[in-house]
Image (tube, coloured by chain):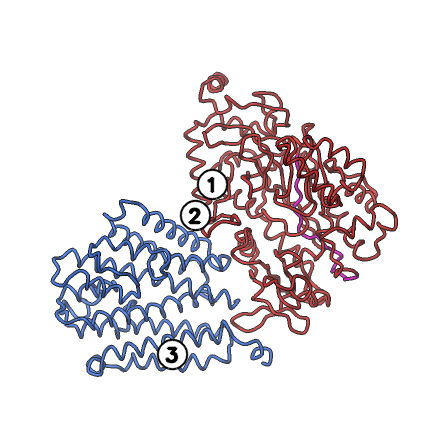
Amino acid sequence: MLSRVADSLYWMSRYLERADHNARVLESNYNSLLNPAKESRVSRWNRITQSLGLDCDLSNNDSPWSLLSFIAQPGNRSSILGSISGARENASQVREQISSEMWERLNRLYHEVNATSTRPEFGSEPLRFLSLFREGTYAFHGVTDATIAHGEAWYFIQLGRYIERADCVCALLDASYSVSEGADDLDWIGLLTSCSALDAFRKVYTANLAPECVIEFLLLDENFPHTVRYSIERVNSALSAIANVTFTRHADKIQRIIGKLRSSLAYAQIQEIISRGLHLYLMQIREQCKALHKAVHEVYIDYSTESVLES
Amino acid sequence: MAAEVWRLRNSVDHPFSDYELADAFDEMFGTPGRPRPHYEELYQRLLEQSREELWRSKQQADISFLNQGITFTVYGREEGTEHIFPHDLLPRVISGAEWDVIERGLKQRVQALNLFLRDVYHEKHILKDGVISGELLYTCSQFRRQMRGIKIPGDIYVSICGTDLIRTPDGKFVVLEDNLRVPSGVSYMLTGRKVMKEIFPMLFHQCGVRPIEHYGQALLATLRSLTPDGRANPRVVLLTPGIYNSAYFEHSYLARQMGIELVEGRDLLVHDNVVYMRTTSGLQRVDVIYRRVDDDYLDPLTFRHNSTLGAAGLFNAYRAGNVVLANAVGTGVADDKAIYAYIPEIIRYYLGEDPILNNVETFLMTDDKQREHVCANLHRYVVKAVGESGGYGMLIGPHSTKEEQSEFRRKILADPRNYIAQPTLALSTAPCFTEDGRIQPRHVDLRPYVLYGADEITVVPGGLTRVALRKGSLVVNSSQGGGSKDTWVLYQ
């Protein structure tokens, strides 16, 4: 596969995952905001923006309708419209590599977001918009799994999706936990819903919403698709599959990083993590994700010509 | 039934109630209200449909185009000016007998053009025999000196050709221009067909339309047949200038249809005169490049030094015979608008046959008599710059002002070699579904696509019918308010 194509597939997938994640976080927080607030809306919004990497000044606007600005800031790559445009731009560069169903799905999603977010009545129905969007991304993932070969291209898509997810969930956990003074059950429910994890959580821990349990679940659970550990495991299988098809001899660097990441998630215990500082732990995971991204880039995308011609 | 049709015909809502025939040949009607036999099926079907039904079909087609992302980019505006390709709801129908003439004529023409190209880059018999002058040939901006003496596999210079045909008032098809460099539009032919089959499945079935869906396979077979000797399992790629090119949709569409890699210049590199592409598994050798990049941008070492769209060293690899480019470099010399005037002669010279498809009468501004005549009667002629395409750099005499005419007169006198003139042609008209919900005649042309491989010449039965959507307009280029129609070539 062309290196440029692999790069575009990877980024298409990352952008879409980010859009999806942001939509879920906004939807869940919007729901919480409908309850009478004990903290000011401004500080809550600030927490959300911080966790989403969005850059909005909300000091003058504590209306929940300001949701719109997160969704449709065209210049901002982290807004939903921005991310979905990023995904679509990357997809358009590799249209011949993805199935036409995938392209149509993504293209339609983009046009829907674009049309909805500019309609004046949007302000009164953000929830409908967000759930519509979520369904659109689910459909895209379904179409992706069903209509292209689960070969190299698909694995690069998986890689982008789960590396982004691991990073986003870490950022969200970090932001939620760092201001958890005085947080109540509703806040933890909000956090779980942001990861579509409320039902799954209850099945494992019952309705006991102890902060440690919530963090443990979202960080270390092996089986639920929106946890950090699960994401890293998927990243690992995507990377091994890619190494298998490409016969790359320089992949050991990648192996080392992913190996470390996996063991730090597999053998960690939540009490230990919290006593040493959750923030520090999450930062390390995010750093390693970044290193992984860089290594993948060096090995598969932007390698030096000399290294290849010699071998 | 007859009474029913009669009633429909005379009701106010009758879709053809204000279809006016003018001087031009009309594809559907010989005389008012009497469709030609091959249009009968379509005519009857349209009479049965209400304006609302047609509207719904049109909207359904628009949505289908948008969702499939069938768009093109208009240059010179902000990002986001991706438009759906304007298309007309009603197909243009060509009878089997008419098509057979077109097909034979196109094959003859592309054969002669290839022989001509081989000759001008090698022995130049045609100059020695005085059919065309050396001055005319060497002043052609598309003549590529670098190609002299280079051996091309199978002597096939033009393997993909999109010839523009128009139908004159006497009903004959004539060639308006040959597009021998990187002809585009074939993806709109293919996707337009897909949409039409969705919208009018029964009509399509009843008419007996020849299929065009095998174009992708035919193109790939053509490209593979050009492979350099001794390369089993050749790797064919499509080279695109990138996503900001106006025809990018087509590039990616064709690559997908053929199942080949769509590469950009930055994906390629040349080492020891061999072309490679950069993949996740390392470098892989490339054998045949279907390039949609103009000659000038192919290789910064040989042509334009500031081009980033090609690959450095590509031309040397080409010269060494390690890679094939389709079309070959320098084919533009044969679609120069002044050379065009000589093509009937060129056909006679190389093939010893009379041309099956004729040219439009063309006046060369380098000829004193012809120039004087045209300059004195500019209001009657269409003047074209020889190297331009896409409908740019043109004067349409009858629609021009005195100022425009005198400006063109000045330009012609300053650089006669750069201009030709043709009589204003009444392009034939075909019924179109207009924005106000009526069916009206609009001017159309036809661009069929010819594939010339080492083993056979293929003309897929169909093509892109371009239509001037504005009333009375003769400009069919999509960059200037033109659109397309599906073209149905019938078995009968």
Q: Which residues are magenta?
A: B149-166
Chain in blue, by letter, is A
The residue pinned by badge 3 equals A258
Label ID, residue B228: none
Q: Tell me the CA gap for discs 2 and 3.
A: 39 Å
Compared to residue B349, the image places residue B428 above or below, namely above
Instruction: Identify which amino acid the numbered label 3 is placed on.
Output: Ile
Instruction: Identify which amino acid the numbered label 1 is placed on.
Output: Glu
Of the two numbered discs 3 and 1 in the rendering, the one whose residue sits closer to the viewer: 3
Instruction: Give the color of chain B as drawn.
Output: red
Q: Quadrant of residue A63?
A: bottom left
Label ID, residue B67: 2
Question: Which of the two discs, 2 and 1, labels the residue nearer the N terminus?
Answer: 2
**Residue at left offset 41%, top offset 34%:** B56
| Crowding near the residue tagged with mark 3, few <14, some 14–19, many ≥20 C-alpha atoms within 10 Å | many
Q: Tell me the CA gap for discs 2 and 1.
A: 14 Å
- Mark 2 vs mark 3: tell me if same chain: no
The residue pinned by badge 1 equals B198
